Image (cartoon, helix red, strand yellow):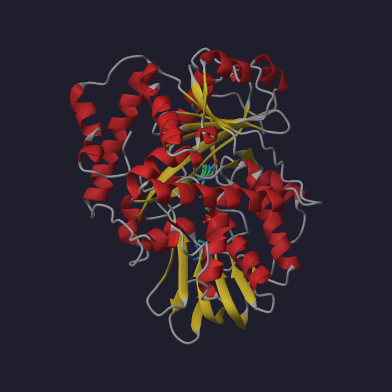
Amino acid sequence: MTMPVTEATPLAVTSWWFDDAMAYDRSPASPSLNGRFEADVAIVGGGFTGLWTALLLKEKSPGLRIAVIEAGLCGSGASGKNGGKVHGYWSALPGIAATLGPDAALAVARAGSKAQEGVRAFATAPGRDVWWREAGNIRVSAAPAQDVKIETAIACARDLGVPDSAIPLSPQDVAARIQSPVFRAGVFYPEAANVHPARLARALRRAALEQGVTIFENTPMIKLDRGKPNRVVTPSGEIQARHVVLATNVALASESEIAPHLTLFSSYALMTEPDPAALEHMHWTGGQGVADFRMFVHYFRATRDGRVLMGSGSGPISHTGDNTDPSLTMDRDSAKRAVVGLRRLLPAFNNAPVAQVWGGGIDISADRLPFFKTLPGGTIHYGAGYSGHGVNATYIGGQCLSSMVLGRKDDWTSLPFCTRRLPRLPPEPLRTMGGRVIRASIIACEEAEERNKKAAWPVRAIASLPRAFGLKIGTR
Ligand SMILES: Cc1cc2nc3c(=O)[nH]c(=O)nc-3n(C[C@H](O)[C@H](O)[C@H](O)COP(=O)(O)OP(=O)(O)OC[C@H]3O[C@@H](n4cnc5c(N)ncnc54)[C@H](O)[C@@H]3O)c2cc1C
């Protein structure tokens, strides 16, 4: 179904990507679990994290019996509905260096490069049609107030001795790559790709099956009995396994041990119908991903068949980390911001009909970096906190979690993702209530700045509170 770009565009439950991937991948759903199943490792969640963990475990220890259970179909969560922008941490260097110091920031960025190699090797292997295109990522200033971020990015890369990781672009350089009346100067990050995320998730599922991983789809875990072995209980059966990996993404925000470190925001994205002529008109034929410098970022990329995906990371904060909160997927105002972003940033696409609009929860950690940890007892492992940036980082998750299951201390488990002491988020109700007020203020500031104005001072004062309190989220 196609429709014009209007504020009344209905919201999809899945995503354009997932529907397309399921039409392409005609394999039947894996059976759901009935009865008792014994495994060495049970992985809960069939998104990128769970599937990479399963595949990398098979690579590191081929004899392991591994079972993955997925509440719906593999790839039906965030992994099948994201922007498909694949990059590590070079563009996040200033923030990470401020939090963890320069050496750890470089270690994190280099791990992202290794992950990029891992995802690339998988995505480009023969027989995998996952729309991989590697042409770098541009961050562009789309308002005078955003210009300052350019200098910060360039100076940080220079000071850390990696100037080639962030290359300044003049307004003319930007226009040669993508033309828009509101784009100013920018930064080019060479290490970045675009992918069809749902096809990637389904290809990971297929590869895991081929490697002998047992997958149960339409099989939610309803209880986890910790013990020796652990028991993963489902509506019609259970898996007994020595090790359990919880790869359930936003659902982890409700786990008592993890909740102090994880909150849920949301992101909304739209996919247009194909309009290759509009891409030509904008000179945007090089395949680069793009994002502006808002904190509630607009992220966008073109597809192989001439569509544009436009996302807005400005969706609501869920109530006390509840991943079933409808505002994570059904907030019309956030969907409208994606539509408004398309119109303002890429007016050449004003007349392109929208194929679908959808939203999804984003697992945000207190320092915006993912974490991979083991619960006391040593046999239950988990990974979360991707903070809206997981297509590359879930490969890191798979490497870390697989090594943790095997008890290995290696280059992956020595990274800050596994070793750092996790910062805590403010307690409830301050976290949800305060977060919502601050979010609204930041949106008001960023929208005013796009009109080259300033929001009223009380709004600006509220928007600056997170920085004043030394927080790493909600800071512009
Ligand atoms: C709109 C949007 C745009 C994004 N854009 C980008 C982007 O461009 N680039 C980027 O790097 N990142 C992006 N992200 C983030 C990225 O998609 C995620 O970080 C990543 O997909 C997380 O993978 P995952 O496997 O941990 O989670 P998921 O893919 O959500 O997988 C978790 C799975 O666990 C299952 N599950 C949950 N509970 C249970 C249970 N009890 N029993 C069994 N199964 C269960 C779920 O059904 C789900 O399939 C975006 C996210 C969204 C929502």
Residue 329 in the image, given as x and y percentages of width and height = 47, 44
Question: Residue 158 lies in what quarter of the image?
Answer: top left
**Along the line of sight, which residue is nearer the eye, 417 or 313?**
417
Going by the picture, which residue comes out furthest to the right?
Answer: 127
Going by the picture, which residue comes out furthest to the bottom?
Answer: 228
Q: Is residue 461 left or right of residue 209?
A: left
Give the vertical position of 247 relative to 168 (above or below). Answer: below
Give the vertical position of 273 relative to 257 (above or below). Answer: above
Q: Is residue 223 left or right of residue 22?
A: left
- Residue 353 in view (yes/no): yes
**Along the line of sight, which residue is nearer the eye, 332 or 371?**
371
Residue located at (56% from left, 80% from top): 239
- Residue 310 in view (yes/no): no
Residue located at (48% from left, 57% from top): 249
Residue 89 in the image, given as x and y percentages of width and height = 49, 44
Residue 399 in the image, given as x and y percentages of width and height = 56, 62
Q: Is residue 232 left or right of residue 253?
A: right
Q: How many marks?
A: 0
Residue 128 in the image, given as x and y percentages of width and height = 77, 50
Question: Residue 322 lies in what quarter of the image?
Answer: bottom left
Give the vertical position of 44 relative to 309 (above or below). Answer: below
Residue located at (38% from left, 44% from top): 97
**Along the line of sight, which residue is nearer the eye, 177 or 435?**
177
Q: In the rendered view of the protein, which quadrant contains the N terminus?
A: top right
Residue located at (43% from left, 43% from top): 266
